[in-house]
Image (cartoon, helix red, strand yellow):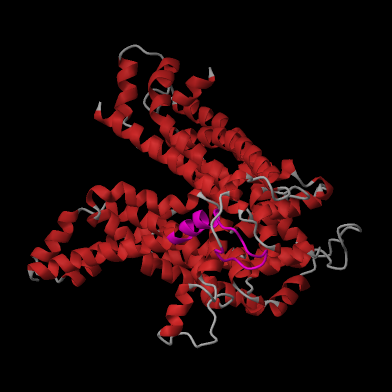
Amino acid sequence: MSAASLLSTTPVASASKRGASRTAYILLLLPLLWLFVFFVIPLVSLVSTSLYDPAGSLETGYAMTGHVQNYVSVLADYRSHILRSFAYAAAATIACIVLGYPLAYAIAFKAGRWKNLMLVAVIAPFFTSFLIRTLSWQMLLGDQAWFADALRFVHILGPDGHLLATPFAVVTGLTYNFLPFMVLPLYTSLEKVDPRLMEAGSDLYASPITTFAKVTLPLSMPGLVAGTLLTFIPAAGDYINAELLGNPRTQMIGNVIQNLFEGGSYPEAAALSVTLMAVIVVMVLVYIRRAGTEELL
Amino acid sequence: MTRAGKWVADHLVLGAGLMVLLYLLTPIFVVVLMSFNDPASRIGYSFDGFTLDNWRQPCLPNGLCESVVLSVEIAMMATFFATILGTLMAFALVRHRFRGRSGVNVMTFLPMASPEIVMGSSLLALFVSSGLAGALGFWTILVAHILFCLSFVVVTVKARLAGLDPRLEQAAMDLYANETQTFRKVTFPLVFPGILAAALLSFSLSFDDFIITNLNAGQEVTFPMYVWGAAQRGIPPQINVVGTAMFFLALALVVAGEVRARRASRV
């Protein structure tokens, strides 16, 4: 069988069920091997690194002592970083919903012939570097920028108040960086909503708000759930925004992990990394069950 | 609701949407503007004066162009391998029913659902525990990039494949094309836009990655790592020249693709 015929085997054309599934395994062999060696095994080795005796170092090697104490000590030392990361990520996710929903709705139902142009504008930030864009916020939120001046003028910001190097700046940056990941799945969901269902709602004397709450919003739930996960997860692990737009008191769990690795404290860094992953997995599972969209996975 | 009220309600959403777009696009204007900046000092990030010098001498800052070349090399290789592996996987998942299929689906989804810092640190843990701590560099970056691009390729190609009308292939078979001919003349051309989109996505993901790369790069400096280092010392405006050039190159590609697609659909 040539490579081309392996790929072209349609369900209809496949000679037998067993033959078809053998083809599938041949196709999957290399990609699965790659995922196994470079995703599954690394996770295992991350967990085992987190149990090493922290007394060792890269040069002298680490002793595997099943040192669960690493977890106790990182949780004690970095509890505020962990809580802060999830608080910032939650704030950014909520901001993404508040900003992203109207945008996705406008593109799906109000944009008319400008739809494609607006979609390109949503992905346009990806055309240039993430880091350079985040650096732009240093200028936009800086003390000399008109935005800070305007806020000072209306007394939202005190005369000596800053925007940059505050939690506000970090959440603004996180929201900005992950907003397209909210808008795109929301748009995909909203696009599939039949406008006639919304008309039916108003024909049956529902107010626009009731129609939205009872018809549009429930139908867009898959997009909302996907968007929430796609913003919350990377935001919780990010350290770029906290580093470039924050101050030492706005450091997140990612900053700590990165600094521990740079400082050579591998077991602690690994323990913190495993903790982050575990918390996220639990939150995602609870969230998906609550939202009732298990088919998403 | 009155007609005027409806007009306001309609345009309120559109207006809000446009405001949000402005928020998304403002930093890009800053990048373009700053590429023409004539900075008064190395510290601070403000527009001090207009100049074309940065565009005339983009390679002036030490190591900048080398880092761009390295990032392009890695992105090209990562795209090549991730696109092949991911396309094979997408075909298997869409075109075949086999035992363990849902498990494979979860396996492709997981790397996308793990935070970059976790993926980066687990790879580092693997490399270090297999005695490769000294060998961190080009190849470890490449391995990491292929890994995180792979899932995105699978998702993109899968979407395209799942949207194909199976009757087109059946028609080819009915007209006595064998499997190879059907694949070459019908299936592949139809899936190709999806593969191309996946490759472009991989390239940009790889070129732009910082968190995973930073952990596994050893002494190598990719473009995002160069920007990161510059952010601590003072940002040369040439970085914005690279950012602006990237932006317009990508925009041109997307617009060209859109124009082609429109022309094709009109025929």
- Identified at 66% across, 65% down, the residue is B41
Q: Of residues B204 and A206, which is closer to you in this image?
A: B204
Q: Is residue A121 rendered to the left or right of residue A271? A: left
Q: Is residue A246 above or below residue A102?
A: below
Q: Is residue B94 above or below residue A132?
A: above
For the N terminus of chain B, give its image quadrant: bottom left
- For the magenta stretch, what is the residue range? B26-48
Q: In this orientation, does residue A172 appear? A: yes
- Identified at 52% across, 70% down, the residue is A89
For the C terminus of chain B, give its image quadrant: top left
Q: Of residues A171 and B239, which is closer to you in this image?
A: B239
Please provide percent x and percent y for residue A247.
63, 76
What secondary structure prevails in the magenta region? Answer: loop
Please provide percent x and percent y for residue A120.
38, 48
Q: In this orientation, does residue B114 appear? A: no
- Identified at 77% across, 49% down, the residue is B127
- Identified at 66% across, 62% down, the residue is B231
